[in-house]
Image (cartoon, rainbow, N blue to C red):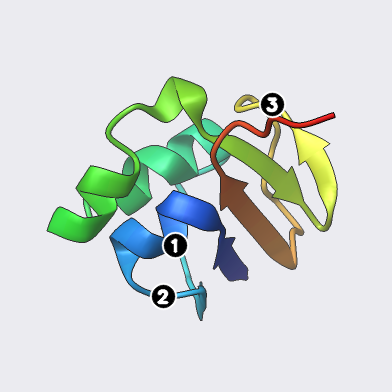
Amino acid sequence: MKAVYFAWVRERIGRTDEEIAPPASVVSVGDLIGWLSERGEEYAHAFEKPNVIRAAIDRTHVKHDAPIAGAREIAFFPPMTGG
C-alpha cells in the first residue's frame, strides 16, 4: 500500500509518500501509526502524538480503529483548520 504524508507530518518524515508493507499484525490505522513510529527517529517524531494525526483510506477520512485491509492508499495529516 502507499502511505502519503502531508504538512508537518511530511516535513518531519522527509518524504511525501512511500510504498509500505506492514506485517500481518498491523490491522488498523492506529496499529499502522504505531508500526510507522518504530521505523526510525523521523517517524517517531512525526507520530509522537498519534491522537492528533488524522488519516484517510483511499481518500475517505477514517478513525484510528478503521481496518486497513485492502487499502491502496493511506494518508496522514495533522488537524486541519480553516473556514
Question: Circle 2 is placed at which residue position?
Answer: 15
Tag 1 residue? 10
Q: Few, some or many C-alpha atoms within 10 Å of disc 1 (few <14, some 14-19, many ≥20)?
A: some
- CA gap between label 3 and label 2 equals 23 Å
Q: Position of residue 75 (x, y in %)?
A: 64, 55
Mark 2 secondary-structure assignment: loop
Q: Look at 56% across and 58% down and name the residue there.
A: 6
Vertical arrangement, residue 48 with respect to residue 10, above or below: above
* Vertical relation: 2 (above or below) 13: below
Q: Residue at x 13, y 55 (%)?
A: 41
Please tell me the numbered disc located at residue 63. Answer: 3
Residue 67 in the image: x percent, y percent? 69, 38
Q: Name the amino acid, label 1.
A: Arg
Which of disc 2 and disc 3 is earlier in sequence? 2
Q: Which mark is residue 23?
A: none
Residue shown at 52% from the left, 55% from the top: 7
Camera-side residue: 3 or 66? 3
Q: Are marks 3 and 1 in contact (CB under 8 Å)?
A: no
Residue type (three-letter) at the residue carrying disc 2 = Arg
Location of residue 48 by image quarter: top left
Quadrant of the drawing holding the N terminus: bottom right
Q: Residues within 10 Å of mark 3 (few under 14, many from 20)?
A: some
Q: Quadrant of residue 49?
A: top left
**Foreground: 4 or 80?**
80
Residue 4 seen? yes
Residue 8 appears left or right of 80: left
User: If you read the primary sequence from the N terminus, does the residue marked by circle 3 or circle 1 appear first?
Assistant: 1
- Answer with left or right where residue 56 lies relative to residue 22: right
Q: Are marks 3 and 2 in contact (CB under 8 Å)?
A: no
* Local secondary structure at mark 3: loop
Q: Position of residue 73 (x, y in %)?
A: 71, 64
